[in-house]
Amino acid sequence: MYSLHPSLKIPITTLLVAGSLLLGVSSHANVYATNIRLNDTQTGDVNTTQGSSVSISYLLNDNATAGVTIKILSGTTAVRTINILTGAGTVKGSNSVAWDGKNDSAQNVPAGSYSVSVTAAHSGYSDWTQISDDNAASSYCNRPRGIAINKNINSPFYGRIFIGNSQNGPNVGTQAWGDVPGIYKVNADGSYSDDGSGRFGTAGYPFTGAAYYDGGDNPINMKVEQDDRLYWNNWVGDGEVTACDMLLTTNQVVMPEAGYSANPYYPSDNWKSFDITDAGTTNARIYLADANYPSAGIWWWPLTNGAADIVNSPVGNQALATGGDVPLRCDGVAVDANTNVYVAETRSNTGDPAPRAICFTNWDGQSTLISGAAWTAGSADSNFRDVYNLSLDSAQNPHYIAFGMYSTNVGIIGIRILNVTDGSTVVTNLSAGVGYHGVNWDAAGNLYGGAQLIHRWRVWSPPGANQATTPALATLQIAAGATPPNISKATVSGGTVSINFTADVTDLPTTFHLLSASVVTGPFTDTGATATLTGPGTFNFTVPVNGAAQFYRISR
């Protein structure tokens, strides 16, 4: 008896439209899948055979209220589409779905190489909505000065969140979560990430947890770049930028204080903010923004082997100088893929006419900017001040730019969100009344912030229906299944039944059982007979005649 039993099919409807395997995540989708594993394997080849079940597991950062679509692809063609409308498979956190190895016609897919993608969809919120839980233990951090999210869709750490605690907490002596200075890491759904160094690490850097207002040797202004490294400013001395791997095991000083000691503004500079462009390529740069008043502006150095090339560029290159449209104090800098430069300035005086946000477009990447801003925003806006950090939602295709505002003396603070096209206000003060030092975005358009006074990091989803597709990094390698045993001849002679059959040449006689029944509908029982090998891939069963009629099946 060797048969292929079609499993129960999930009705195939076009609920979601998923793109090809390598389709990037929409910049304004709030729910998305991360940590996709095939048979618990995240990267590399997963070997299996035709007709075998495959477990597809993944994490969702939010409930997929409009369902989840899983596609099994041969090249760019979906051979099987599984739509899950609600319930298991669509909930925030860990999900697992079994694929039976069959195509949309309930037949085993042919042997070959297959990829998997997971598309999650949401019916949408009516406004920017907090989707993190302040009561979750993992949301606590004593002084979250830095927060970063891995946006690299082809990284096994895609969606991972890093939170930098810059100051000792009340329970630092017990090594409590969020109280020890260093870096904490969680998954996109807020669960702990325990790989590598565990859920907390220092990457070998000696964080101090100093009690001084701005500290020193502490992680601030964190960001994950294209080279899959986490960068942060330790703010030791006049600033020191360091990078580490995603597991927080080792570090590399990217820009030491000695790297800009030849700069004409040293030592009166205060390089609090930075940005990295084209990380991991020969065009990589580091930009430093001076937060002093008056400011040295913004300077850049080339990166070689992951560190600032201070040998060939000891002074650095001035990208932006004070005067004209340029602010007097640069508390944030971001440079997108088209070398548009975005600047934040901290202004603390009510009614101050100076802009808080400035954008320069079409920069040639070499000459010094002084005037000609494409837009400015925030002039004389008393509710848009004390900016401590800025972040673009995407360096390749930006839509929004967020500014974290922090002050213990200002009631109207929070996060201001602007449209990068013209500087118009998208959100006036998200989470008004709470000060945020660090802000950042994930690849799906969710906004993150670190708030010191409430000792929490938070996440908000943008409004509107949305969906996002994530490719699995592991690939299914499906081998041909075993050949079904096939009865080629049956004879009766001298009270003996001889049954010849064929199967794989690698099969052993002990692989098979001979079943019999007196009627064709069964039930069939094992005869206990032993098969013999008669040639390559050919076998024989011999049993005594049993009754006037007998029906036989062979099973593996």
Image (cartoon, rainbow, N blue to C red):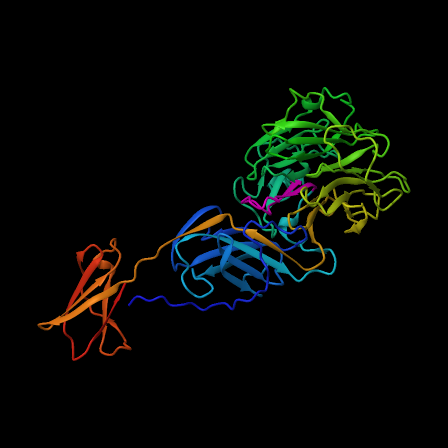
Left or right of 182: which side holds 416? right
Q: Which residues are magenta?
A: 143-164
Location of residue 275 in the rendering, given as x and y in whole percent from the top left corner? 69, 35
Total labels drawn: 0
Q: In percent of the image, x 62 and y 31: which residue is there?
A: 206
Along the viewing direction, whichever of 225 and 146 lies nearer the viewer: 225
Task: Determine if residue 459 is in view.
Answer: yes
Instruction: Tell whether 2 sits left or right of 151.
Output: left
At 52% from the left edge and 51% from the top edge, which residue is drawn? 36
Does 105 sit left or right of 273 as displayed? left
**Residue 281 at x, y percent in the picture:** 60, 32
- In the picture, the quarter occupied by the N terminus is bottom left
Name the spot of residue 315 as percent of width and height, x first: 72, 21
- State which quadrant residue 7 falls in: bottom left
Is 231 located above or below residue 432 in the figure? above
> Could you say which quadrant of the image residue 170 lies in?
top right
Residue 264 counted in the magenta span: no
Nearer to us in this view, 163 or 398: 398
Can you say which quadrant of the picture contains the C terminus?
A: bottom left
- Residue 334 position within the rendered picture, expressed as x and y whole percent measured from the top left: 72, 38
Q: Is residue 155 magenta?
A: yes
For the question of whether residue 438 can be seen, the reply is no
Residue nearest the viewer, comparing 94 with 204:
94
Residue at the left extreme of this rendering: 494
